[in-house]
Image (cartoon, rainbow, N blue to C red):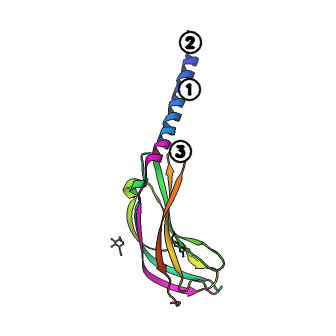
């Protein structure tokens, strides 16, 4: 005859085992989701473009960021962290990456959006490198699952230019 404690323990072990199995399956099933997000970003305006007193270039842009990240959401998705980075080359660095805007998308319903915004973080460069600079805008996203591993991906949008002159 088993004691109550023994049975409770067996039940708990079974419960934990089932939970662990469900987590593993949830995480595994995410591997079958092949997201196909889309993004477009337009630079609507260069609000100002200056050389600061310390000699660094700084630019303020108004952006129209549209994206559809709904396909990145599965039932195992907790939230998606998204950020837009300006990426460009200079003689000092092969890749300069500056985050301009970011957001946390809490649910699939919020994953299709179009936002009109100025850059939330300063776009500055150490030196006078930004005039006439060609740059890419890359939308990066990190999918944070309820259980299992996080994964990240991005969309690169090319062909942006900064003005030749300060304004
Ligand atoms: C922003 O971009 C979206 C998609 O390209 C477009 O439908 C919308 O009209 C744009 N908004 C502005 C203010 O340009
Ligand atoms: C922009 O992205 C393209 C494609 O990934 C890449 O070949 C190019 O070097 C990038 N340009 C800059 C300025 O980073």
Which range of residues does the magenta coloring cover?
A: 27-53
Q: How many residues crowd mark 3 within 10 Å: few (<14), some (14–19), many (20+)?
A: some
Q: Position of residue 17 (x, y in %)?
A: 54, 30
Position of residue 159 relative to residue 115, above or below, is: below
Q: Is residue 93 left or right of residue 23?
A: right
The image quadrant of residue 63 is: bottom left
Q: Position of residue 27 (x, y in %)?
A: 50, 43
Nearer the camera: disc 1 or disc 2: 1
Q: Which residue is denoted by mark 2 in the rendering?
A: 2
For the point 53% across and 86% down, the residue is 132
Marks 3/2: CA–CA distance? 36 Å
Q: Which mark is residue 13?
A: 1
Q: Earlier in the sequence, mark 3 or mark 2?
A: 2
Q: Quadrant of ligand 1?
A: bottom left
Nearer the camera: disc 3 or disc 1: 3
Q: Earlier in the sequence, mark 1 or mark 2?
A: 2
């Amino acid at each position: 005859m088993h004691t109550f404690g023994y049975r409770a323990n067996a039940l708990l072990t079974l419960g934990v085992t089932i939970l662990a199995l469900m987590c593993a399956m949830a995480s595994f099933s995410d591997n079958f989701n092949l997201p196909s997000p889309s993004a477009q970003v337009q630079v609507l305006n260069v609000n100002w473009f200056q050389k600061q007193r310390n000699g660094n270039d700084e630019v303020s842009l108004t952006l129209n960021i549209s994206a559809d990240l709904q396909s990145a959401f599965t039932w195992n998705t907790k939230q998606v962290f998204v950020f837009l980075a300006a990426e460009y080359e200079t003689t000092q660095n092969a890749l300069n990456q500056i985050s301009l805007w970011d957001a946390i998308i809490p649910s699939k319903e919020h994953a299709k959006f179009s936002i009109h915004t100025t850059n939330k973080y300063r776009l500055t460069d150490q030196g006078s490198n930004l005039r006439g600079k060609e740059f890419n805008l890359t939308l990066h996203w990190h999918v944070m699952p309820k259980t299992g591993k996080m994964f990240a991906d991005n969309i690169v949008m090319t062909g942006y230019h900064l003005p030749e002159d300060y304004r």
